[in-house]
Amino acid sequence: MLELLQQPWPWYVAGPMIGLIVPILLLLGSKTFGVSSNLRHVCAACMPGKIDFFQYDWKEKGLWNLVFIAGTVIGGFLAGWVFNNPEPIDLSQQTVKELQVLGILDFRGMMPDGLFNWQALATPVGILVMVAGGFLVGFGARYAGGCTSGHAITGISNLQVASLLAVIGFFIGGLFVTHVIFPLIL
């Protein structure tokens, strides 16, 4: 059992499980899958000011979502520490070659250690990638009215054209950063 939990699950198991979340949430109270709205719920719960955007019953609309994100954090911790697979991740040789050209040489974990570590955060590239990139992702998610998971999983499954356009934009942005911005800054 432990070995099963340490291995990546194939797409034909993980994909349908993610896809089943949408109808299950809809059946359990017309809830939608997404993560970025949690920032609004936390602000609504913690801000004492009179900002209209945060004046709503966050417990009724967002408590389940906050529990979901807490479960995601706990699951991430369990996956990263308890069920951590010490083997290198399985990447194609072409991907390894392309990442090595960018200066990424360590493939032991899910995230390149050369980019995502505390020492890298103190460098201009680290600040640009982690701080500025994180801000842009958060701003973009709110500006688009939802995050990648909300638009890609819930929005597209509900046949929303806006979500399809948002997901196309996410992919274009990701390809642009990977093939244009990263080679310039790494």
Image (tube, helix red, strand yellow):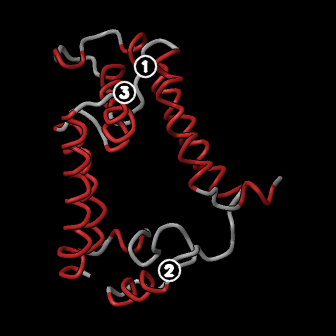
Q: Which residue is mark 2?
A: 92
Q: Which residue is mark 1?
A: 31
Mark before the other along the chain sequence, 1 or 3:
1
3D distance between C-alphas at marks 2 and 3 = 40 Å
Q: Quadrant of the C terminus?
A: bottom left
On the rendered structure, is 146 left or right of 42? left
Q: Amino acid at mark 2?
A: Ser
Q: For the residue carrying disc 2, how many other residues have a C-alpha within 10 Å: few (<14), some (14-19), or many (20+)? A: few
* Foreground label between 2 and 3: 2
3D distance between C-alphas at marks 2 and 1 = 38 Å
Q: Which residue is mark 3?
A: 42
3D distance between C-alphas at marks 1 and 3 = 18 Å
* Foreground label between 2 and 1: 2
Mark before the other along the chain sequence, 2 or 3:
3
Residue 2 coordinates in the image, percent (x, y): 81, 55
- The residue lying at 69 percent from left, 66 percent from top is 85
Are dots 2 and 3 in contact, CB under 8 Å? no
Observer-nearest of 98 and 52? 98
* Foreground label between 1 and 3: 1
Circle 3 SS class: helix
Residue 139 coordinates in the image, percent (x, y): 20, 44
- The residue lying at 46 percent from left, 29 percent from top is 22
Mark before the other along the chain sequence, 2 or 1:
1
- The residue lying at 27 percent from left, 17 percent from top is 48
Q: Amino acid at mark 1?
A: Lys
Observer-nearest of 61 and 97? 97
- The residue lying at 57 percent from left, 77 percent from top is 108
Q: Amino acid at mark 3?
A: Val
